[in-house]
Each structure stands twice: as structure tokens, then as C-alpha cells.
Image (tube, grey):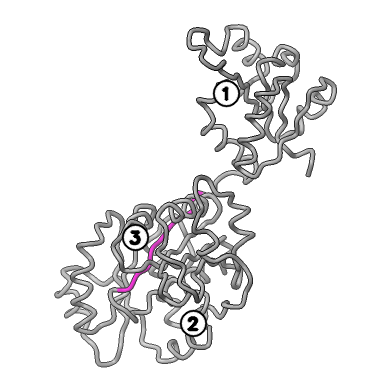
Amino acid sequence: MQNRRPLLITDDSELTEDILRLAAATGVDIHLETHADSARAQWVIAPLVLIGVDRLADFSNLPRRRDVIVIARELSGDTDTPPVSDSVWRDAIAIGAEHVVSLPDAERWLIERLAETGEGPSRQGVVVCVLGACGGAGASTVAAVMATSAQSQSRRVLLIDTDVTGGGLDLLLGAEQVPGARWADLADARGRLSVTTLDEALPHVGGVAVLSFGRQYAGPLNAQAMTCVLDAAVRGYDLVVVDLVRTLDAVTTIALTASASAYVVIPNSVRAVAAAAALLPALNFGGPLTLLMRKSPRGLAVSDMERALGQGLVTALPDDSAIAVSAEQGEIPGPRTPFARACVEALSGAVSQLSVA
């Protein structure tokens, strides 16, 4: 709504230009007022008030309120005169200003503050990574089940695909025809990405936002784009599930660094265990690392796998021959299946901030 826009009060054209530029970078629309009566009418209802030092004295007798920022602009080449005088500080205190800042030094901070106004407070989302010890381990299925199970508990969830040559995680969900952005559309993302813009752009499957690759090769996943997306994801979602490719590159490092927990899916075969034994030390992950055993009837016993890997397997995912068939049809195990319950137990047991059981 128009009257819920941040309010800017100033007659300084250059300051106005600076603020509008910063607001545009965050996708926030600014309500500019130069007329005193109109500005006073907006004073109480605006979610954020930005007031230039040139107009501060005119409003020093208004009721104190939260979310007021006084803004000064440094003169080009003037390093001797402080941009904020004692009288400015007195007037700022009188109206209960939250901060007194100076541009351009405070530009980055002000961008963050404007973005919070447009998005609301950060959700401080939890990031988890799921990867397979070898190809065909079923990590994508586990990631999808974790995401859909969390969403069924009224969580806001984002599922991220990182395998550029994997054919697209949306295929697993039967969502390849659902319109929305894929990684190719976000390859050039940099800086602060609007949570609202991201969520509106992505396809949603059963309420879960999905960032997947398409069917055409889009080039390697850009580390800067991954950083940008994860930053927005943490602000906008309760849970971010990353279906992580096994390539130990910058993207993997970025995702693991952001993660509260990581899960490695290991089929109970000799080759998978050998692959896991090589992978685990190379991950260099400092958080909780959960090993999920993908059972098959004639595979290794739990004790043999634990002995070979030198650590315990927290959860065994039950053998279910129907899972592979369902995946070909774009379906994932339902929440009541033993496989899904095991995935949810692993998620809620390792991530204490998030209860999805």
C-alpha cells in the first residue's frame, strides 16, 4: 500500500537522488515528501522514516517514534568539516532517531535497512545439505522428502539443485512444466537479492519453492550467484535444503559453510562405502554430519559399514523398491511411508532449531 512505503523527508536533491538509487537496488518504493504538513501526516504510519539533516529542525517537536534514521551527506572533497553537527545530534535525540548516518559511508548499511522494510524481519532460516556418497545414492530423493515434509508443517521451504548435469531436480518432483525461474535465469545474480522477488520468480511444488537446473546445459554454477541466493534464502525461508553435488568446488564450500547440518546418503555396497571413505575427509565440514545408510537386501551390514567408515550411521533408510519407480513418474515418497519418516527423523534430530517431526 502506498502509505506503507518508507518516508523520505528532505529538500536536498542530491540526497534524494542517492536515497532513491539505494531504494531501487532493494526493490523498495520510497514516499518522498517535501511539504511539512504532508510529511507530518505520514510520520506515524510510515514503516520507516528517513529524514535529511536539512529538514530535521522542522520536525524536532513531533512525537517520538521508532524507525527514524537521520541522514547527512558528506560534501565531495570536504574532509575537515564533520557532516553531523552537535545541533543535529540534539534534534535527532529529540525525535528518538534510531541512527544518524552519513552517505556515502553508510550506503551498504542503509541498503540492508531499506531491504528489511520491504521484506520484514529475517526468518534466520536453517540451511542443510544433502549429498550422495556415489552416483545413484538417492540424495535428491532424500532432499526432496525433507523439503516437502518440512513444508507440510507450515514451514516456508526452498529446495536448491546444484547439479548442472543432473537433468534438473524439478523432474524428480514432476514439475518440469511448471513455469518459473531456473538457475540459468539467476546466473548473473549479485549482491542483495530481494526475498520477495526470488520467491515470486521460482516455481512452487506442493508449496515448496524449487530452484533447479533446466534441461539445457547452463554452464557451471556461479559461486557468486550461489552466495547471493543463499543469503536471500536464509532471510526468506525457514528451511533451505541444498541437493549438493559431490564436486568439491567453491559452490560446495559456500553451501557447506552456510549449513547447520549435512547429510551423506550411502548405499550399503562395497563401492559406495569406499567412495564415502574418500569423500568424508575431503568435505571438511565442521558442523553435524549425519550418515544415512540406504539399505538394500543383499548389501553390507550396518556394523561392517561403521567399521569401514570409522563412525556411526545415525539413520538407516528402509529399502523400498517402489521409490525408483515413483521417481520416474515425478513422485516422491509420501509423508506416511517408512522412507519419508526416516528422512524426517534424521532432519529433526540433527537440526535442533527446526522441529518437523
**Callout 2, which amino acid?**
Pro
Does label 3 or label 2 sit earlier along the sequence? 3
Q: Residue 269: image x %, image y %? A: 23, 84
Magenta segment includes 125: yes
Q: On screen, 98 above or below 317?
A: above
Q: Which residue is mark 2?
A: 333
Name the residue carrying label 1.
99
- Crowdedness of circle 3 by 10 Å Cα count: few (<14), some, many (20+)? some
Residue range in magenta is 124-132
The amino acid pointed to by label 3 is Thr
Disc 3 vs disc 1: which is toward the camera? 3
Q: Is residue 153 left or right of residue 126?
A: right
The local crowd at label 1, few if under 14, some if 14 to 19, many if 20 or more residues have their Cα within 10 Å, is: some
> Looking at the image, which residue is at 48% across and 12% down?
79
Q: Is residue 167 above or below residue 155?
A: below
* Residue depicted at x 24% and y 57%: 284
Q: Are marks 2 and 1 in contact (CB under 8 Å)?
A: no
352 in magenta: no
| Marking on residue 252 | 3
Q: Secondary structure at mark 2?
A: loop
* Residue 14 location, quadrant: top right
* C-alpha gap between disc 3 and disc 2: 27 Å
Image location of residue 74, percent across then percent down: 56, 17
- Where is residue 220 drawn, in percent x and y? 40, 64
Q: Amino acid at mark 1?
A: His
**Residue at 63%, 71% in the rendered image:** 179
- Assign a secondary structure to mark 3: helix
Residue situated in front as seen by the camera: 133 or 31: 31
